[in-house]
Amino acid sequence: MAAKRRATKRSSSAGSGSGGSSGYSLVRLQDFIGNQDLVSRVKRASLPQSALFAGPEGVGKKTLALGLAARTDCRNRPGEDFCGNCESCSKVAGGNHPDIRLFQATGTSIGIETIRHLIREARFRPFQGAYRVFIVDQAEKMTREAANSILKTLEEPAETSRIILTTAFPNQLLPTIRSRCQLFVFRPLTRNQLRNYLEIRYGAEEAEQRAAFAGGSIGRALRLDLEQTLQDRDRVLTVLQQWLSNASFTQLFEACEKEPMRRDLKSRDRVREHLEILRHLGEDLYFLRTGTESRMVNLDRRERLLELAKRVDLDWIRDLLYHLREAREDLDRNVQPLFCFETLWLKLAGRA
Ligand SMILES: [Zn+2]
């Protein structure tokens, strides 16, 4: 059930806004997109003292946390929601409500000083509402020291304090942190939910494409450089095509040596994007082979992909998807990006 309209301030429900002094992007609970079972669950209940919001990036974890925080002190509280207009809601949106604090990484990590600050503040009584709410966004970025220091506060927060941690990587948190929090699992959005949401802003055709490439994340759908993605897609598709016609390493290495591929393959983020595109192409081949075309991402390249689908069997596609997962893991383990990309093709050699 996708929502129809936005409530206050900026229009993303993805939690991709940065907040801070420029304010936070608030979305009323009734307008929240996706994860409706979870939203109605938290709407009925009061906030647990320590909560962990876990789920993929860009599905609204921070946004829902801020919404629940805004609700604690909303003067109107229409239908278990917050109003977005009262003095308290305006302060939350402006990032200056004294009882609602959002902690985010500065640089790549959340250090001990930030968490000490939180721990100190969590002992105070609320200034104006019934609760103080502390949100730690991307909690996996806490340093080990910071993570250890928050444990006691998570276990025994002050009666009037609520702590919400959000993360797309729950496994990177200390098990002792996970066990102290009530877990709320967010799922990726469906393509329909994304498309309906994006259609007003981008029109039907572009909404369809953005929804297809976004992998269930509103944040990604909004940030996506569509033109660049389509260019990348065609380049990766050409490599795949060449590979399936002759599996020539010479040709592959030549392609990798040419700009802009050469530059892209030096960047971890760009290789991650290329692997993601290749995964979509691989899945499309699978959908074509199994008669489930409606699920394809690259429908506009159906003819080219159909040609390729005739040359591979399902085992080859499964191998491709399996090795892609390995390549992504290698990339996360800091293996050199170009090496990840080339190794993937080496593994596929002899299978085509
Ligand atoms: Zn309000």
Image (spheres, rainbow, N blue to C red):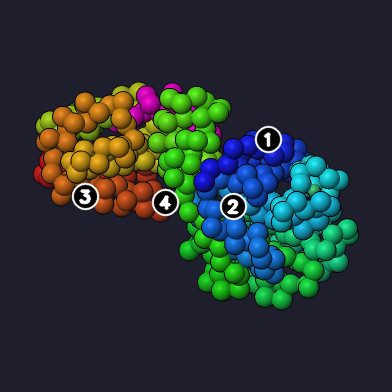
Q: Distance between the Cα atoms at labels 1 and 2?
A: 16 Å
Disc sitting over residue 318 in the figure: 3
Q: Mark 4, mark 1: which one is toward the viewer?
A: 1
The question of residue 112 being in magenta is answered with no
The residue labelled by disc 2 is 61
Disc 3 to disc 4, C-alpha distance: 21 Å
> Residue 226 lies in magenta, yes or no?
yes
* First in residue order: circle 1 vs circle 2: 1
What residue sits right under mark 4 in the picture? 332
Disc marking residue 10: 1
| Mark found first going from the N terminus, 3 or 2 | 2
CB atoms of marks 1 and 2 within 8 Å: no
Using the rendered view, name the quadrant where residue 345 is placed.
Answer: top left
In the image, taking residue 349 as reference, residue 147 lies left or right, namely right
> Tag 4, which secondary structure?
helix
The magenta segment: 222-236
Residue 236 in the figure: left or right of residue 205 = left
Callout 2: SS: helix
Counting labels gives 4
Q: CA distance from mark 3 to mark 2?
A: 32 Å
**SS for callout 1:** loop
